[in-house]
Amino acid sequence: MEQLASIFGAVEKLSPFGFFVRVLGVAVLLYLGSRFLPRRSGGQFSAYDFAFFWMMGGLIAAPLFDSKNSFAFVIISVTTIYILHYAISYLMVKSRTVARIFGGTAIPLIQGGVVLKQNMKKALFPIELLLSGLRQADAPNLAEVETAVLETSGHVSVLKKTDFQPVTPKDLKMSAQEAGLPVLLVNDGRIVKENLRKINRDESWLRGQLEKYGALNLKDVYLAGIDGSGRLFYSMATTT
């Protein structure tokens, strides 16, 4: 009991074993926090997400650098902050008002081909960043742009004028086949049986298809799969 108190409580000097347990506990807290966070890409984090990360980082690291910080209090604080973050994320899904408060709103920067100077000032968004965003959207010429919007993530979304938009099969009155997601069938020489069942095929069919391409030994196939149009793709293993 005394040993647990020395690990999770505030102590003058932390033993190597106590430090190891704290490091392990920090790793578990970080994993649980990242595992159950709302899924977003790096550019989609809002202001409250960054506040959450900063607070979590400081709290979790504190008991490792200073043994006088109670690890039990850190666990309680991290759990409280995580629940608060999850609650805000949940409310943002349920309420547009909450979403606007915590996530902000998109700001139009170009409308009808005209740069909105007042909105640029409101967003503190310099023209250099706007031009950079246009280049990244493959619209370096301002004359091609119909609308540009500064998203809440900081990304600039661009819509080109009709005359500069790419031609689609529909425009050419052509029928296009649905692509669909590719399915992995072989991973490092091993058949992914679950995926093979999903496409209603068996191992003999797969081996036969690979043999057509000269892959006689399955162990020599590093990667193989089938795309949405039913075409097989593969890559042979290389030896160094």
Image (tube, rainbow, N blue to C red):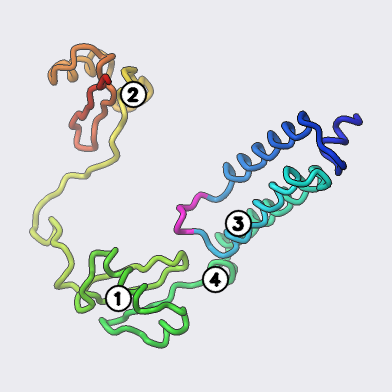
First in residue order: circle 4 vs circle 1:
4
Residue 111 image point, x, y percent: 31, 81
Could you tell me how far apart the alpha carbons at marks 1 and 2 are, in whole angstroms?
A: 44 Å
Q: Residues within 10 Å of mark 3 (few under 14, many from 20)?
A: some
Q: Which residues are magenta?
A: 39-44
Residue ID for mark 3: 90
Q: Earlier in the sequence, mark 3 or mark 1?
A: 3
Residue type highlighted by circle 2 = Asn
Q: Please state which of the two labelled residues, at mark 1 or mark 2, is closer to the viewer.
A: 2
- Residue at mark 2: 187
Which quadrant would the C terminus be assigned to in this image? top left
Query: Gap between marks 4 and 1, in whole Å?
Result: 21 Å
How far apart are labels 3 and 2 at the CA level?
A: 37 Å
Instruction: Where is residue 83? Give x, y as percent.
Output: 69, 52
Q: Earlier in the sequence, mark 4 or mark 2?
A: 4
Look at mark 1 in the image and give the residue it sits on: 147
Separation of disc 3 and disc 1 at Cα?
31 Å
Q: Dots 3 and 1: beta carbons under 8 Å? A: no
Asked if labels 1 and 4 touch by Cβ distance under 8 angstroms, the answer is no
Identity, as a three-letter code, of the amino acid under mark 3: Tyr
Q: Which mark is residue 100?
A: 4
Select label 4 or label 2 by which is in front.
2
